[in-house]
Image (tube, coloured by chain):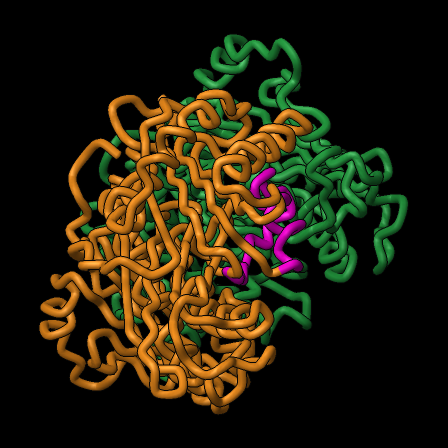
Chain colours: A green, B orange
Amino acid sequence: MAGAVSPLAVPFPDLPPLAGLRLGAAAAGIRYQGRDDLVLAALAPGSTVGGVFTRNRCPGAPVDWCRAILPAGRARGLVINAGNANVFTGRTGAAAARASAEAAAKLIGCPPRQVFLASTGVIGEVLPVERLTSALPALYAGLGEDGWAAAARAIMTTDTFPKGATRLARIGGEKVRISGIAKGSGMIAPDMATMLCFIFTDARIPAPALQKCLDRGVSGSFNAITVDSDTSTSDTVLAFATGQARHPRVPVDGGALLRGFAGALAEVLHDLALQVVRDGEGAEKLIRVDVAGAVSPRSARRVARAIADSPLVKTALAGEDANWGRIVMAVGKAGEPADRDRLAIAIGGVWMARNGTVVAGYDEAPVLAHMRGREISIAVDLGLGQGRATIWTCDLTHRYIDINGSYRS
Amino acid sequence: MAGAVSPLAVPFPDLPPLAGLRLGAAAAGIRYQGRDDLVLAALAPGSTVGGVFTRNRCPGAPVDWCRAILPAGRARGLVINAGNANVFTGRTGAAAARASAEAAAKLIGCPPRQVFLASTGVIGEVLPVERLTSALPALYAGLGEDGWAAAARAIMTTDTFPKGATRLARIGGEKVRISGIAKGSGMIAPDMATMLCFIFTDARIPAPALQKCLDRGVSGSFNAITVDSDTSTSDTVLAFATGQARHPRVPVDGGALLRGFAGALAEVLHDLALQVVRDGEGAEKLIRVDVAGAVSPRSARRVARAIADSPLVKTALAGEDANWGRIVMAVGKAGEPADRDRLAIAIGGVWMARNGTVVAGYDEAPVLAHMRGREISIAVDLGLGQGRATIWTCDLTHRYIDINGSYRS
């Protein structure tokens, strides 16, 4: 956390209280000293939950815990800690997860299986769970409606700014609010992208409908960003609905009534996902990669990701070098259908290469001017079909190496 | 090319003359000033050739040219230039390739389709082919038997040391020699790995048999290394046999007579491939990743590559940080069968994690001592089956970003 704030940082938004949610943060001394590292959320009785988790085959104990309790769709509590990911910690780690849930459940007055967990930080070290559980009673006693910024700060690890977003939506004419916080800046890749993201709404939505909206929103947000192609063992997106808003009853499968809600939820997720990229470890530029003309959306997505994950593309972007040859290389290495002689490439809206060669009279000056900015756009047209995809990433700079060469020390 | 020599560099070996081969280098001023950038090799009549090329879907014009002429299996010449890759240059690029081959063929006195080509350097700029062809006559006139080191230097781009290797083998009791040079230090990934590698032998080997030996040798060498996961558009391995040695006739499909030759060729390829990793852009450590216990060799290879390509693993290695949690992450993200609770991980022969948790009484001191060295070994046992694979890579350091942030400037 030491060091300068990302030049791509955005201010933390004003997040109003949300009916049915009390939130707080505390310093449990799990790893960090002199800062909050523990978050507790208490949800109104009857709250529902949806979740999406990492596809990493070596998930952490909190991910195992959440996966096991998610099918019931009920949530009363959420415990998050930073500094220790409780990953690859065997039975001790599983016991630590259970003990955290039990301690929070006792305070809230609910079954432990209605308490969700997330941990982020170092892998492979046993979570000092007593520090966590002994900090919970005072934290619970102090829970309030204004804990958003403190919670967003307490879950940071290598993040340089706290991340929040909020939108209003209407369900059957009634206003509902969707607010969320997220953390993550390294080990970020699609499927899943962020390390942690928590969404809260006062809407009253059955768990299956909430899950459906969440799945759709995640695919265009957290699954469309990449910082370093590494997939975390802890990635978790949870959405909680406290059911306090007064709107018509939502059917189990959602349906048309949730159209506006689903759109607003997708916007919150997208906003938070882009904040995660803006805080990509060492990031100095936010990169948008649009691929069109692929044989399918899936193929477009793979090509976009090959570009966005290429260290050579990312270092050229950091160096403000309009080296579009590396984009050609990345397209070619994706292994997807591509015809060199139909390929077209643009940076900042300037098409520099078409039909397998440089555009006649190509002037690099406007491209270089675009590249000196903070937000860079790359467009590729494969000229083969209708498949499109967009991926966001950041550049690869010295700070990434500084941060990751000595994270533990 | 400016900057310090890789700390992992090895001396250029003493490569004796090879019957049937004359080699030379010259300064054509294609991009670099004040250094050789053009290599010409002339081969005895009757020489055969085998080749392996990049799988990148956007290959360069020289790769297209070589692919087209390879099936005939005959070679009399080889032209290599550094500084311009002649990739993504459309019809102009194809014409430039043809003109280079024609100019060399005229000097050697052979059909253009027996002249192989390779170019390395910047992508997307038209090759100034007149500079190349006008330098060829003087270069041809000065060809000699001692051009190895000069040729190895002339094909360097971001390389910091020239790369060569040689072995003796016996075919039917008669000695034959296999010598090669290579270049490459970035945009290196399996399938294909190096940018350029050229092998010469005085053996008399039918092209199909030579191709078979080459395919086998490449899979354990250039297809088992990765520097930055990026696949070049120009990767080329060519093996030429001048047929000057006096040994029993080798059948078209090779067979038992070539066993010793194939083994020695594999050694030369392996030696050169490891030199390419040793000169990985910014490399300060050579990393060997051994994966065992996978469900298949293919699965083992994918897991090994996920570890070797992970920026988080590579930056931790650069920082001499025994952060084995990132190895767990990389195993999990490979998408291959893996059971967290059977996984075991070692660095420098010290098993630090077994059965899904840290080893009791694990002492980090010997691991840290190993990590401070130049050659690091990582071993992973998935505990599932008999599949094994080994991949070599290097660490990810600031120098990689320095080199690639401003390659063209």
Residue B188 in picture, x, y percent from top left: 42, 51
Relative to B152, is B205 above or below? below
The residue depicted at 41 percent of the width and 50 percent of the height is B228
The quarter of the displayed image where residue A81 is located: bottom left
> In this image, B111 relative to B231: left or right?
right
Q: Quadrant of the N terminus of chain B?
A: top left
Q: Can residue A231 be spotted in the picture?
A: yes
Q: Is residue A71 magenta?
A: no
The residue depicted at 70 percent of the width and 33 percent of the height is A343
Compare residues A53 and A209 and report the one nearer the observer. Answer: A53
Q: Can residue A272 be spotted in the picture?
A: no
Span shown in magenta: B47-72
Relative to A380, is A95 above or below? below
Compare residues B226 and A73 and report the one nearer the observer. Answer: B226
Residue A359 in picture, x, y percent from top left: 65, 17
Compare residues A193 and A197 and report the one nearer the observer. Answer: A193
